[in-house]
Image (cartoon, rainbow, N blue to C red):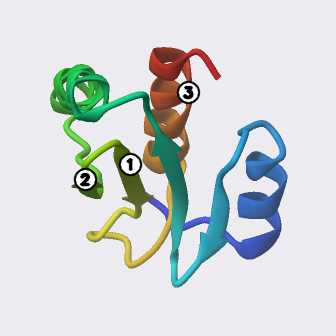
Amino acid sequence: MKKLDVTTIEKNLENLNGWEYKDDAIHTSLEFENFKEAFATMTRIAFEAELQQHHPDWTNIYNTLNISLSTHDAGGITEKDFKLAHTIEDIIGG
């Protein structure tokens, strides 16, 4: 899969709420009511990521989930990252 240029990345980010581009990845941070809600959302994302064969880099601290998406094989951001980001947005109702 082909790495996207900065202009294309920035254009695609216009269609995502709360995502930003830095360090060759797109990032978002999500806050939930509690740990249980954060973990439940992570589980839903994990199933979708597995279906897409594209997995996020993420951390979870109590009710906060930080997600970074990048296609390591391509050395940056590809369409796969935006597809998963939109899936995440659908899951969280964004």
Q: Residue at x 82, y 68 (%)?
A: 7
Q: Earlier in the sequence, mark 2 or mark 3?
A: 2
User: What is the distance, in whole Å, between disc 2 and disc 3 at their CAs?
Assistant: 17 Å
Q: Nearer the viewer, residue 59 or 82?
A: 59
The residue carrying mark 2 is 60
Q: Is residue 38 left or right of residue 67?
A: left
Q: Position of residue 80 (x, y in %)?
A: 43, 44
Q: Which residue appears farthest toward the front when viewing the image?
A: 34
| Residue displayed at 49% across by 62% down | 2
Of badges 1 and 3, the one in the foreground is: 1
Q: Residue at x 38, y 78 (%)?
A: 75
Does dot 3 land on a helix, a strand or a loop?
Answer: helix
Which quadrant of the figure has residue 48?
Answer: top left
In three-dimensional space, the C-alpha distance between marks 2 and 1, rounded to whole angstroms, equals 6 Å
Q: Residues within 10 Å of mark 3 (few under 14, many from 20)?
A: some
* In the depicted structure, whether residue 8 falls above or below residue 85: below
Sort mark 2 into few (<14), some (14-19) or many (20+) by Cα contacts within 10 Å. Answer: some
Looking at the image, is mark 1 or mark 3 earlier in the sequence? 1
Q: Amino acid at mark 1?
A: Thr
Place of residue 23 in the rendered image (x, y in percent of width and height, measured from the top left): 52, 84
Task: Say which element carries label 2.
Answer: strand
Distance between mark 1 and mark 3 Cα atoms: 15 Å
- Circle on res. 64: 1
What residue is drawn where x is 41% and y is 61%? 68
Q: Are marks 1 and 3 in contact (CB under 8 Å)?
A: no
Amino acid type at mark 3: Glu
Q: Which residue is mark 3?
A: 89
Q: Are marks 2 and 1 in contact (CB under 8 Å)?
A: yes
Is there a contact, CB below 8 Å, between mark 2 and mark 3? Answer: no
